Image (tube, rainbow, N blue to C red):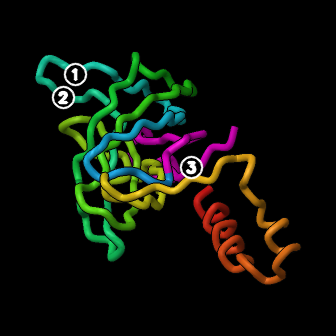
Amino acid sequence: MLYLSWSAAAAVPGRAVFWSSRFGDNNIPAQMTAGRTATADITIRNTSKSKWPSKSNEKGRNAVHLSYHWFDRKGAVVVFDGLRTPLPHDIQPGESVQLRATIQPPDRAGKYTLEVTLVQESVAWFPERDGDKLTRSVNVINANAEVSSVPVANAVSSHERAKNNPGAGVGRDKLANNRLKSTH
């Protein structure tokens, strides 16, 4: 299982290591439809030395949830407070959990950046404390947009296309492969 991680919190003296986490496997869709929620399975690992509480305390604070932010092409925030996905139970240090997140894309079609992360309610978003985040480019289409699909039996691989028409599609395939490499 591949884990992506960044946690400077552990490297900075006096900095709380509560926020240390790693995102693992996920199936966040590359395309979503405006006005319709999407679901994604996202694996997260608690790499801190503290348990993450799944329930709020008596003041309604401190529960950890998975959530997200949406940004437009220029990096401006489109949606700051995404829907929340609760933890199924307190997550112990070293424990991994797969969550089924419900994601509400922006209302307007376009290309966006989705930033998935954790939030400790009424305290902080994990990246604000040097915690991990998962970033993906997502194309949001209109609900009435026609989506064309090619049956698998009729699909042609990029290698077949290049063999039958040298040079066709090479740039697009190379670009797609580079994007895949840069998002993992």
Q: Residues within 10 Å of mark 2 (few under 14, many from 20)?
A: some
Marks 1 and 2 close (CB-CB < 8 Å)? yes
Q: Which residues are magenta?
A: 1-29
As measured in the structure, the alpha-carbon distance from the residue carrying label 1 to the one carrying label 2 is 5 Å
Can the viewer see residue 56?
Answer: yes
Residue at numbered disc 2: 61
When the figure is inspected, residue 144 is found, relative to residue 75, above or below; the finding is above
Marks 3 and 1 close (CB-CB < 8 Å)? no
Kindly identify the residue that appears in the image at 23 percent across and 56 percent down.
107
Q: Secondary structure at mark 2?
A: loop
Of the numbered discs 1 and 2, the one sitting upstream in the chain is 1
Of the numbered discs 3 and 1, the one sitting upstream in the chain is 3
The percent coordinates of residue 169 (x first, y second) are 71, 76
The percent coordinates of residue 49 (x first, y second) are 49, 30
Q: Secondary structure at mark 1?
A: loop
Towards the viewer: 163 or 26: 163
Q: Amino acid at mark 1?
A: Ser
Can the viewer see residue 12?
Answer: no
Q: Residue furthest bottom?
A: 167
Residue at numbered disc 1: 56
Q: Residues within 10 Å of mark 3 (few under 14, many from 20)?
A: some
Q: Residue furthest left?
A: 59
As measured in the structure, the alpha-carbon distance from the residue carrying label 3 to the one carrying label 2 is 26 Å
State the mark number for residue 5: 3
Kindly identify the residue that appears in the image at 42 percent across and 36 percent down.
39
Q: Amino acid at mark 3?
A: Ser
